[in-house]
Image: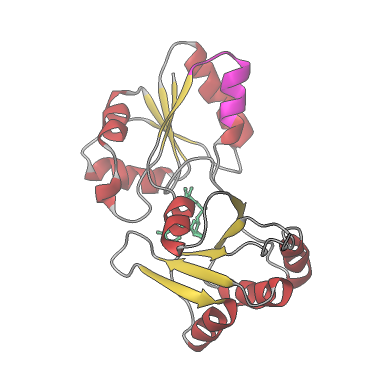
Amino acid sequence: MLYLVATPIGNLGDITVRALDVLRSVDYVASEDTRKTGMLLKHFEIKKPQIAFHEHNEDRAGERITGLLAEGKSVALVSDAGTPGISDPGYTIVQKAIAAEIEVTMLPGPSAVVMAAVLSGLPLHSFTYRGFPPHKPGPRRRFLEVDLASPHTLIFYESPYRLVALLKDALEVYGDRDAAVAHELTKFHESIHRGKLSDLLAAFTQTPPKGEFVVVIAGAAKPEN
Ligand code: SAM
């Protein structure tokens, strides 16, 4: 059995009871970063052999893991933080397991996209998760333009080094929409800034950002009938 196990995005208290039960019971833990996961396991006094599974060895490690699963072993896949597969390695091993008719399940838990979406206060009947925008200005603008007419709330992950550039390009591409920037969710310095894109751009230009961020932007206004 393959378990995709969500882990905390900052606050270790967010691990679920089921996640701990599964991490204790499986034969192997497949982890994006064995050192970081080692610290998590140690915190919860769990000793388990780990298999490195990250973007640079996803194919090879995926074959090894599906081989173990086919032999009847159980494996829990975790990423550095949050939900495996969400802007993290995960879906390719799910594909391999499905193809090999191996049972797969997920242990739900933290994910920054969901927490930021809910805290933004923006409509969530539907939303579009875009992950990380490209680093360079031209590709980033074209990436944003894809959703110009979309009525759905838009959600992006961004590093502190490119947050201001993303807000600036978003303001130019979408106009001055309502938005929110979620910062250091579940951590001691958790904050959420809500306002127009121009307000957020001004705030983060003044104070250089540090830490982890999610940007949530209102969708295009629906045309009047
Ligand atoms: N799999 C993770 C999830 O389910 O949220 C996301 C992994 S992705 C590689 C890391 C990005 O998620 C960060 O750069 C940031 O944009 C966002 N993120 C993760 N933890 C966060 C937190 N505590 N507060 C704000 N954003 C966070």
For the residue pair 25 and 15, the one nearer the viewer reads as: 15
Check the image and name the residue furthest to the top: 71
- Residue 89: quadrant of the picture: top right
Q: Position of residue 10 (x, y in %)?
A: 34, 56
Q: Which residues are magenta?
A: 93-103
- Residue 5: quadrant of the picture: top left
Q: Position of residue 160 (x, y in %)?
A: 52, 71
* Residue drawn 45% across the image and 66% down it: 182
* Residue drawn 60% across the image and 58% down it: 154
- Residue 193: quadrant of the picture: bottom left
For the residue pair 65 and 21, the one nearer the viewer reads as: 21
Check the image and name the residue furthest to the front: 225
Q: How many marks?
A: 0
Q: Does the magenta portion include 101?
A: yes
Q: Is residue 189 visible?
A: yes
Q: Does the magenta portion include 68?
A: no
The secondary structure making up most of the magenta span is helix
Please tell me whether residue 90 is drawn above or below residue 9 in the rendered image.
above
Left/right of residue 140 with respect to residue 34 in the rendered view: right
Please tell me whether residue 171 is drawn above or below residue 186 in the rendered image.
below
* Residue drawn 49% across the image and 53% down it: 113
* Residue drawn 59% across the image and 82% down it: 198
Please tell me whether residue 104 is drawn above or below residue 80 in the rendered image.
above
For the residue pair 48 and 152, the one nearer the viewer reads as: 152
Q: Position of residue 24 (x, y in %)?
A: 27, 28
The quarter of the rendered structure image containing the N terminus is: top left
The quarter of the rendered structure image containing the C terminus is: bottom right
Check the image and name the residue furthest to the bottom: 206
Q: Position of residue 139 (x, y in %)?
A: 77, 64
